[in-house]
Image: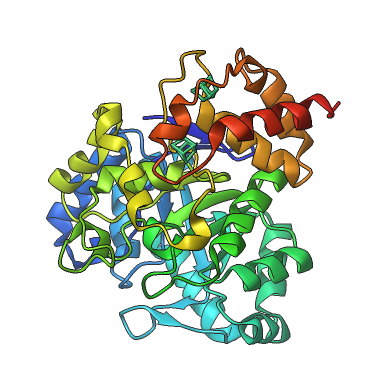
Amino acid sequence: MRYRINQKTQDKISELGLGSAYMPQTPLDQAIPALRRAYEGGINYYDLAAGDGKAFPMYGEAFADVRKNILYQIHFGADYSKGTYGWSLNLDTIRRSIEKQLKELRTDYIDYGFIHCQDEFSDWETYRENGVYDYILELKEQGIVRHIGLSSHTPAVIQRIMEDVSIDMLMFSVNPAYDYGQGEYANGSVDERTAIYRRCEAEGVGISVMKPFSGGQLLSAAQSPFGQVLTPYQCIRYALDKPGVLTVLPGAQSVEEVETLLQYFDQPEEALDYSVIGSFAPPQASGKCVYCNHCKPCPMGIDIGLVNKYYDLALTGDNLAVQHYKALKKNAADCVQCGHCDSRCPFSVRQSERMTKIQTFMESQE
Ligand code: SF4
Ligand code: SF4
């Protein structure tokens, strides 16, 4: 397992986490071993926007003895009073739901208390008017909620909420379909979505990724909007390459499915290369580096994806990215303009020209 640090909370978070949309459909005697296998495989981050309320006693039984070693995302707005998931903005409903969830999880604290599923500006207004956000703050003051998160599919709403309040984690739907305007939650333009990744990275807000396979669509040639299959491993790498992303949260229902996910870390680089999406990138995405490193190897040993990521972040005013760039052993100043990357890039990035721009810009920064 590999881990990333949430810069705002200093929590060490596994690159692969687990979502809980499907696990509750699994019989208990299969779900418990699956969750324990995830834990033994190093997964320490678990999202609890479950498809069914049965998830909570299940997780409680699986993890009560190791609770202090794992992190839960718990959602203020997910209601299970009717058994299956329901969305609510009502304070009393949410309060009852949270109290029940804590009891069934056999815990008395919440690592990340999430402002849940805010996709419209009006959702956020109602959420605050109804006192739900204040309730999260109240629990934070009591030490029950450690950190605050936000889940949303909509970049404009995320920007607004990040202006209004401070968050430590964002749960966002990240996959190539949504980023390229395809699928149910393909909200926001390429640039608006990219701005979310960059803002989170610059402000140290971690991103946990929901729907990394676009609800399974990307794994099926018949259903994929691109008419071409991607593997789960390509989708996971794609999400982990986005600035700000700390962890990806696919679902699983059995020990075997958890093991298949964990094999992500044993895949050769070629199996993780998702540059095929360049062939279906929309015109507005053409010429923009997605940090995929398909253009490697650079004869000068430049990590082209990383240099570009730091540059894009530096353009948004992220001075830390400038410092990270300057600490690289090889950077744009080492480019000899051989053009190899230009000929390899499936996204039509004129990378050799970009290296000149990056060098000039970085030299102007302190
Ligand atoms: S220049 Fe192209 S191939 Fe290289 S990292 Fe950027 S998008 Fe990927
Ligand atoms: S043009 Fe520069 S960055 Fe691209 S492969 Fe050649 S040396 Fe590396």
Residue 311 x %, y %: 67, 36
Frontmost residue, 229 versus 251: 229
In the image, residue 141 sits, relative to residue 337, either above or below, namely below
32 lies left or right of 127: left
**Way the structure is coloured:** rainbow
* Residue at x 57% of width, y 87% of height: 90
Residue 144 appears in view: no
209 lies left or right of 363: left
* Residue at x 56% of width, y 21% of height: 337
* Residue at x 44% of width, y 42% of height: 240
- The picture quadrant where one finds residue 126 is bottom right
In the image, residue 130 sits, relative to residue 228, either above or below, namely below
Task: Name the image quarter holding the C terminus.
Answer: top right
In the image, residue 243 sits, relative to residue 165, either above or below, namely above
- The picture quadrant where one finds residue 221 is bottom left
* Residue at x 28% of width, y 59% of height: 58
Residue 81 x %, y %: 39, 83
Residue 183 x %, y %: 36, 72
User: How many numbered marks appear?
Assistant: 0
